[in-house]
């Protein structure tokens, strides 16, 4: 894993930029003034306590929920300001792993992974079958093509969801709480998989999580959302934040409430 | 202020004694088993008196004789502590068992999360009326938007641009068609028989039993067959659609579709709507036949009419116009039931209770819209003179 250099002199280009984003439910503003940049190849962590709006932030980034204000830029295209057809084009570059896996329960794993390919490519059925088998093998589910989601364990569902997210070779992979509901070993294996895939496919990864082990294991850059301050209160490499941040709440979060001194 | 609370002070029975040890010091001595659901002393008044005493005594506890205890004991103590805190009476918890002290501490007000408790608000009558009106208005707006979207999707389908899986359509066809036959048979047959019974009693008075065939034939073919299948399908299929889509909403499956740029309207709603649009008229024809058969059973069995006689009388009475009107009804009902089911399913919130609510609401919406549509079509036929 390349060591992160959060300084502005970083040579990698910015691929996602969030500007002055605002998250609100009705008239209640949860977060505002969110500003951050994600560079190519980053594993970018959005962290914060339960209910801090991190999943909503991700939904706004992937086009599922229109933000109350602000911009999400992919390159120099502002997602929420372009026409729907351009949005659809952008969406094709996203791969998303939802919290529960969100596999379509009426379809087999193979059909789940094949659907995006059928939808957006001109590949023949034979080619699609081959690709699907390969993607499933990538996540360690080779041979499970004809299983239905209900026949899988939680960890396997997430892996299958990941295979589907990678079906179109996305430029951006988004993960919503990847380790939620997994035992420590499965969670660790999924973390390893995320790192390997991001390195070998040169994919930019955005992860929403509050799992400390994951945050330190995979994160190259991160932001911390604090609903009490109504904005993000820290940004940078998680280890660096832990070592240097002056914000007590962030440090308490990163040390399971113990604070830095007791470490 | 010494009070003995149980005269038959059996050791096992929960009891509390108020022992003043000094003018400004009071010990509460607990004995027996303090278990929730057991016979616990109810000392509200004594406790109220206690904290009203001026100056308030310092309160301590003695628990040497305390047997077993559970949450019942804790709730009682919490009440005392609350009362004392409210009146500024000092309490000394040191006489309590350690476990009790720790649990009381965990539940104490300063250990609760702040800033998250929701304030109970009871808005005034006008506010509630306004809110309900706005909700109704938004609901209506959403429904119109949904119908508009569904229409656009359907037009897209006609131009060959909407995409869904053929297997979804064939499954929906099977669910809404063949699998519905048994219940449609039963209900239509019975409705046909009931119509015949009711008509027979009246017509017999005039000696024109044969017109039972007309009543049943026209009634069933023109409107009853369509309404019966419509209501059956609203309960059977509309609810199923809502539950399926609602569950997909809960599982984020719909988000997954949208994030891929696949419109749920095309992918999920169209196959279901198409299936009902195709199968409902078929079921309606079948239901017509079963209804006529039911009428015939009563006519032949009870009124001594001949089978051929009844058959020809029905043929004479039921014109092709009635048949088309019935079919048109059922076609409209098919669309309405599918729309109601899919709308409520897609509106579903993300929890299990909401799925149940979506199914209920789909059936209610379906049946109401069927009845309203029947009224409208009947009125139109009247105006057009059909």
Image (cartoon, coloured by chain):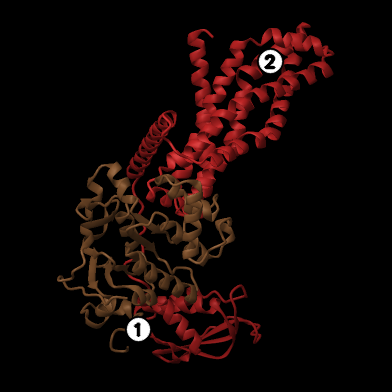
The answer to whether dots 2 and 1 both sit on one chain is yes
Instruction: Give the residue at x 18% y 69%.
Output: A11
- In this image, A14 relative to B168: left or right? left
- In this image, B35 relative to B79: left or right? right
Q: CA distance from mark 2 to mark 1?
A: 91 Å
Query: Dot 1 lies on which element?
Result: loop
User: For the N terminus of chain A, which image quadrant?
Assistant: bottom left
* Chain appearing in red on the rendered image: B
Image position of B168 with respect to A242: above or below: above
Tell me where residue B385 appears, x and y as whole percent: 51, 7
Which of the numbered marks, if any, corresponds to residue B55?
A: 1
Lower position in the chain sequence, tag 2 or tag 1: 1
* Chain appearing in brown on the rendered image: A
User: For the C terminus of chain A, which image quadrant?
Assistant: bottom left
Image position of A206 with respect to B34: above or below: above
Q: How many marks?
A: 2
Instruction: Write down the residue under mark 2.
Output: B217
């Amino acid at each position: 894993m390349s060591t992160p250099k959060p300084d502005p002199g970083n040579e990698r280009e910015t691929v996602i930029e969030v500007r002055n984003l605002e998250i609100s439910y009705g008239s209640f503003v949860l977060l505002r003034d969110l500003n951050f940049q994600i560079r190519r190849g980053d594993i970018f962590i959005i962290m914060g306590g339960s209910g801090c709006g991190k999943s909503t932030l991700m939904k706004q980034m992937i086009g599922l929920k229109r933000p109350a204000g602000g911009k999400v830029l992919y390159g120099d295209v502002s997602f929420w300001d372009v026409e729907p057809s351009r949005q659809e084009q952008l969406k094709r570059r996203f791969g998303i792993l939802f919290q529960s896996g969100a596999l379509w329960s009426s379809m087999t794993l193979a059909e789940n992974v094949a659907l995006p390919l059928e939808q957006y490519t001109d590949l023949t059925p034979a080619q699609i079958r081959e690709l699907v088998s390969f993607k499933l093998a990538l996540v360690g589910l080779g041979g499970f093509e004809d299983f239905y989601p209900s026949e899988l364990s939680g960890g396997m569902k997430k892996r299958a969801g990941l295979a589907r997210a990678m079906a179109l070779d996305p430029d951006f992979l988004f993960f919503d709480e990847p380790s939620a509901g997994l035992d420590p070993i499965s969670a660790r294996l999924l973390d390893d998989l995320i790192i390997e895939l991001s390195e070998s496919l040169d994919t930019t990864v955005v992860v929403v999580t509050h799992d400390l082990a994951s945050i330190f294991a995979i994160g190259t850059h991160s932001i911390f959302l604090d609903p009490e301050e109504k904005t993000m209160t820290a940004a940078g490499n998680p280890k660096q934040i832990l070592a240097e941040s002056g914000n007590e709440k962030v440090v308490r979060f990163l040390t399971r409430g113990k604070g830095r001194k007791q470490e | 202020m010494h009070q003995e609370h149980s005269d038959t002070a059996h050791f096992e029975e929960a009891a509390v004694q108020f022992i003043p040890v000094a003018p400004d010091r009071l010990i509460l001595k607990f004995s027996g088993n303090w278990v929730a659901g057991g016979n616990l002393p109810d000392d509200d008044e004594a406790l109220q008196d206690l904290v009203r005493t001026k100056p308030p005594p310092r309160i301590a506890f003695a628990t040497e004789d305390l047997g077993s205890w559970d949450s019942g004991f804790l709730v009682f103590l919490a009440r005392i502590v609350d009362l004392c805190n409210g009146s500024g009476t000092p309490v000394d918890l040191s006489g309590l068992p350690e476990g009790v002290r720790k649990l009381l501490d965990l539940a104490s007000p300063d250990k609760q999360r702040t800033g998250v408790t929701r304030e109970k608000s009871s808005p005034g009558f006008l506010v509630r009326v306004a809110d309900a009106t706005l909700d109704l208005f938004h609901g209506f707006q959403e429904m119109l938007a949904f119908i508009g979207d569904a229409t656009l999707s359907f037009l897209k389908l006609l131009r060959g641009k909407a995409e869904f899986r053929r297997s979804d359509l064939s499954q929906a066809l099977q669910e809404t068609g063949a699998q519905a036959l048994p219940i449609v048979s039963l209900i239509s047959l019975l409705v046909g028989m009931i119509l015949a019974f009711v008509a027979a009693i009246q017509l017999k008075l005039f000696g024109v039993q044969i017109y039972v065939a007309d009543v049943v034939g026209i009634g069933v073919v023109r409107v009853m067959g369509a309404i019966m299948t419509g209501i059956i399908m609203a309960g059977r299929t509309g609810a199923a659609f809502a539950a399926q889509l609602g569950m997909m909403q809960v599982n984020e499956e719909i988000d997954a579709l949208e994030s891929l740029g696949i419109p749920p309207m095309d992918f999920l709603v169209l196959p279901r709507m198409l299936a009902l649009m195709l199968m409902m008229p078929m079921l309606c024809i079948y239901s017509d036949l079963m209804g006529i058969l039911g009428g015939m059973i009563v006519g032949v069995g009870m009124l001594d009419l001949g089978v051929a006689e009844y058959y020809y009388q029905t043929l004479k009475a039921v014109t092709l116009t009635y048949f088309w009107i019935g079919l048109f009804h059922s076609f409209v009902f098919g669309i309405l039931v599918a729309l109601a089911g899919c709308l409520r399913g897609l509106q579903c919130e993300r929890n299990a209770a909401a799925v149940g609510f979506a199914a209920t609401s789909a059936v209610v919406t379906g049946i109401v819209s069927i009845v309203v549509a029947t009224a409208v079509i009947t009125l139109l036929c009247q105006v057009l003179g059909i």
